[in-house]
Amino acid sequence: MIRSVNDALKLNIACTQCSHTFEESLSWLKLNSDLACPSCGQQLKVRIESGGVIERMGGIADQFEQTLARFREPLNRDDQRR
């Protein structure tokens, strides 16, 4: 279950062995720190630190989403009055 825009963020991961890049969601990576490169099978370890850059970016995205919601509310009320 995605709880916020932060969790929906997709991160590019590069394999340390073959340099293949692939995406995983932040929510998946929070639950699974061990993964394998889909190209060569190299075992990779990913660590998401609380308060790290990725989480701060996600926090900014959440704030932006909340700001947009506030702008949409008056527009929705205007549409309902018509």
Image: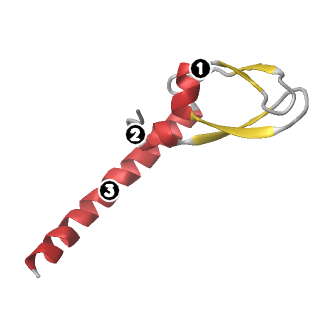
Between 72 and 24, the residue placed more toward the observer is: 24
The residue under label 3 is 67
What is the total number of numbered labels drawn onto the structure image?
A: 3
Element marked by disc 3: helix
Residue at (42% x, 36% y) in the render:
2
Please tell me which of labels 2 and 1 falls first in the chain. Answer: 2
Q: CA distance from mark 2 to mark 3?
A: 14 Å
The residue under label 1 is 32
On screen, residue 67 above or below 78 = above
Q: Nearer the viewer, mark 2 or mark 3?
A: 2
Q: CA distance from mark 2 to mark 1?
A: 18 Å
Task: Give x and y (percent) for residue 29.
Answer: 58, 26
For this orientation, the residue located farthest to the right is 18
For this orientation, the residue located farthest to the bottom is 82
The residue under label 2 is 4
On screen, residue 63 above or below 6 = below
Local crowd at mark 3 within 10 Å, few (<14), some, or many (≥20)?
few
Q: Nearer the viewer, mark 2 or mark 1?
A: 1
The C terminus is located in which quarter? bottom left
- Relative to 24, is 64 on the left or the right? left
Residue at (53% x, 20% y) in the render:
31
Q: Amino acid at mark 3?
A: Thr
Residue at (40% x, 45% y) in the render:
62
